[in-house]
């Protein structure tokens, strides 16, 4: 039954093919050759378009994937930075003798006096201080204390573990109402080294945190408590706060403990590629997750532009080629063949050899020029990406080299503490802890500089201006680099407006300025750490504050803050470039390792304040770096 029906069908198609071939043969030679030329042009242009499409699409896909990777790493880095800051604050508060004495005497007032300045700088922190039996001695701030009166202290993850292990313990937990809270617990000791209580620092992962991530990095992100959204910056959100994640995401991330990546279409039609990563608690369980997203509309737009360009070009070339073929098909044959060969080379990945076609102003010449422009554009993009990749590798190597020294020291010191903490005398134990503190300060400075360098390059660097106590900024910065000063037995003297030089902590006559306190603290920390790093052992670093002449243009009066050391100085040929990123003077390379970011970031911060920077250096006699800031 099938064979009789299929034979007529096959015969019908054979007759149609034979009839079409006969019609083509009846056409004139010019028409045949013109049609053949058009086919060659279409094949050649189509091959180059396909090659360009694949290369550009692949580069766009790779760029999007790398952006997602960078977003995930950046979010995790900012989270780890906050945790490290909280751990440092908890240890510093627990090591204060007044805190231990207040726990023993059950007097909360001195404890509140210690933590109140910290709450001014970190208003999202919450402090709880209890004795070794879990009896709460003090809470701060007061609104937080009123809302936590019935809390069982040792029910908070990490509290009991910190007492048992005599170590700082960090835990991520779910607070009532399914809020994510980081809890850092650090034991406090009396004069004999006995644990008398515990200091706890808590801070939430909430809208403020994701807005900070968005502000500092430009990345859109969301936070989940279990599978419910608690904070997001994605346009329109991946759901209203309180909405639950998809069951497949819950299974992969929360139950499987694995990152999951998927495409999401938000209200309004905007498409994002989103990666969900689990948040792990103290016991290794996934209690939440965070998501970072990157818009893929740019990828779709680029593809649409490519398609919208090549389709009309192909149609126009076919029409023009048919008309020209009737006049000079033989002349066109050679250039078209070379165009086809050039397109094949591009399709095969050969972007170095140009498309060789004799110069002309006809359609074939225009096609050749467009194809050559496309080849040059693709080759230039590829070379630029390769240069960026090489620059990234060089930069990562520099950062890794800088991190390796303090990290190696930290690993060795932690191994000593883990193996010999019970046998070390108190003096040696204190020395080991001080060395750990110095390494942590160096790592924290490096991370701050790396993050700020990325923000400056991306154009997302901002300052929040207001009245700032410059004396407090100077003293806080000196305290920040205290471990480094102690290591080299250096000290810092501060000279105020009155010109009198005083040891750090006794500065006077320093006016308030108009600026961003955190950023100005970063400027001072960079200048002081540079002076400590390159100054000799036992050096006296001098911070001098003087007033500038009143500007004639009626702008805000300024103060000049200079930091002087007695280090090796900077050779004159290098002084013009010391404020450039990654540049290091020849004397600095020999004196100490570094990334060359500190002074570049300092200049960016000061110029964002409307000020200026400069230096004066005499090789062998030391260096003075100065900045100017407007008076409040």
Image (cartoon, rainbow, N blue to C red):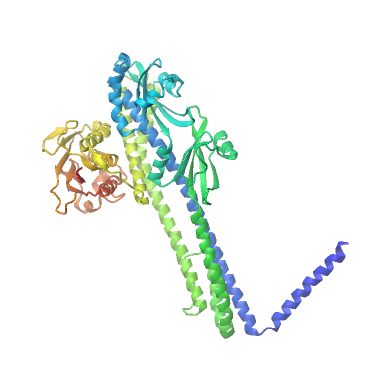
Q: Residue furthest right?
A: 1
Q: Residue at x 51, y 63 (%)?
A: 305
Residue 618 makes an appearance in the image: no
Q: Residue at x 12, y 48 (%)?
A: 549
In the picture, measured across the screen, residue 275 lies left or right of residue 397, that is: right
Relative to 169, is 403 above or below? below
Q: Percent x, y for residue 571?
A: 20, 50
Residue 124 versus residue 403: which sits nearer the camera? 124
Check the picture and name the quadrant holding the C terminus: top left
Check the picture and name the quadrant holding the N terminus: bottom right
Q: Percent x, y for residue 335?
A: 53, 77
Q: Percent x, y for residue 114?
A: 28, 25
Residue 224 versus residue 72: which sits nearer the camera? 224
Classify residue 431 by image quadrant: top left
Classify residue 463 by image quadrant: top left
Residue 570 makes an appearance in the image: yes
Relative to 397, is 316 above or below? below
Relative to 606, is 179 above or below? above
Residue 555 versus residue 301: which sits nearer the camera? 555
Residue 97 versus residue 174: which sits nearer the camera? 174
In the picture, measured across the screen, residue 395 lies left or right of residue 223, that is: left
Q: How many marks?
A: 0
Q: Percent x, y for residue 23?
A: 71, 80
């Amino acid at each position: 039954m099938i064979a009789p029906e299929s034979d007529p069908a096959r015969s019908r198609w054979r007759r149609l093919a034979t009839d079409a071939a006969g019609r083509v043969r009846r056409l004139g030679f010019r028409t045949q050759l013109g049609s053949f030329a058009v086919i060659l042009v279409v094949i050649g242009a189509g091959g180059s378009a396909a090659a360009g499409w694949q290369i550009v699409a692949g580069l766009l896909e790779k760029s999007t994937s790398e952006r997602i990777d960078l977003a995930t790493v950046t979010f995790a880095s900012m989270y780890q930075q906050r945790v490290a800051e909280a751990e440092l604050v908890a240890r510093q508060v627990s090591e204060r003798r007044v805190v231990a004495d207040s726990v023993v005497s059950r007097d909360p007032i001195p404890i509140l006096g210690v933590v109140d300045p910290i709450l001014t700088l970190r208003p999202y922190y919450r402090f709880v201080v209890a004795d070794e039996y879990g009896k709460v001695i003090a809470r701060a701030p007061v609104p937080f204390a009123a809302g936590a009166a019935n809390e069982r202290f040792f029910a908070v993850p990490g509290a009991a573990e910190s007492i048992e292990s005599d170590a700082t313990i960090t835990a991520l937990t779910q607070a009532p109402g399914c809020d994510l809270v980081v809890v850092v617990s650090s034991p406090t000791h009396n004069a004999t080294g006995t644990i008398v209580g515990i200091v706890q620092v808590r801070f939430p992962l909430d809208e403020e945190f994701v807005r900070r991530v968005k502000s500092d990095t430009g990345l859109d992100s969301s936070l989940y408590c279990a599978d419910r959204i608690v904070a997001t910056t994605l346009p329109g959100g991946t759901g209203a706060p309180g909405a639950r994640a998809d069951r497949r995401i819950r299974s992969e991330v929360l139950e499987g403990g694995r990152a999951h990546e998927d495409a999401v279409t938000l209200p309004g039609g905007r498409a994002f590629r989103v990666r969900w990563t689990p948040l792990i608690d103290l016991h290794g369980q996934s209690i939440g997750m965070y998501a970072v997203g990157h818009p893929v509309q740019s990828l779709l737009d680029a593809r649409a532009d490519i398609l919208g360009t090549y389709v009309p070009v192909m149609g126009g070339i076919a029409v023009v080629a048919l008309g020209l073929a009737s006049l000079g098909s033989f002349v066109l044959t050679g250039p078209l063949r070379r165009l086809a060969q050039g397109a094949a080379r591009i399709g095969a990945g050969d972007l170095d050899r140009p498309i060789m076609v004799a110069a002309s102003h006809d359609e074939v010449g225009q096609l050749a020029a467009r194809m050559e422009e496309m080849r040059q554009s693709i080759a230039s993009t590829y070379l630029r990406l390769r240069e960026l990749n090489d620059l990234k590798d060089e930069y990562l190597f520099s950062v890794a080299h800088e991190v390796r020294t303090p990290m190696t020291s930290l690993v060795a010191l932690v191994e000593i503490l883990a193996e010999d903490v019970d046998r070390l005398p108190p003096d040696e134990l204190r020395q080991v802890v001080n060395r750990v503190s110095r390494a942590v300060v160096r790592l924290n400075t490096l991370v701050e500089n790396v993050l700020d360098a990325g923000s400056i390059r991306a154009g997302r660097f901002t300052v929040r201006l207001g009245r700032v106590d410059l004396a407090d900024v100077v003293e806080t910065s000196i305290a920040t680099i205290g471990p480094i000063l102690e290591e080299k037995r250096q000290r810092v003297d501060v000279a105020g407006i009155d010109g009198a030089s005083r040891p750090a902590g006794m500065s006077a006559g320093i006016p308030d300025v108009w600026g961003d306190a955190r950023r100005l603290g970063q400027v001072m920390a960079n200048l002081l750490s540079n002076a400590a790093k390159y100054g000799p052992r036992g050096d006296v670093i001098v911070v001098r504050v003087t007033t500038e002449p009143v500007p004639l243009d009626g702008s805000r009066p300024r103060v000049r803050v200079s930091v002087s050391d007695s280090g090796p100085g900077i050779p004159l040929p290098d002084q013009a470039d010391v404020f450039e990123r990654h540049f290091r003077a020849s004397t600095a390379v020999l004196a100490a390792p570094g990334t060359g970011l500190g002074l570049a970031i300092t200049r960016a911060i000061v110029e964002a304040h409307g000020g200026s920077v400069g230096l004066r250096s005499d090789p062998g006699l030391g260096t003075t770096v100065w900045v100017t800031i407007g008076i409040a």
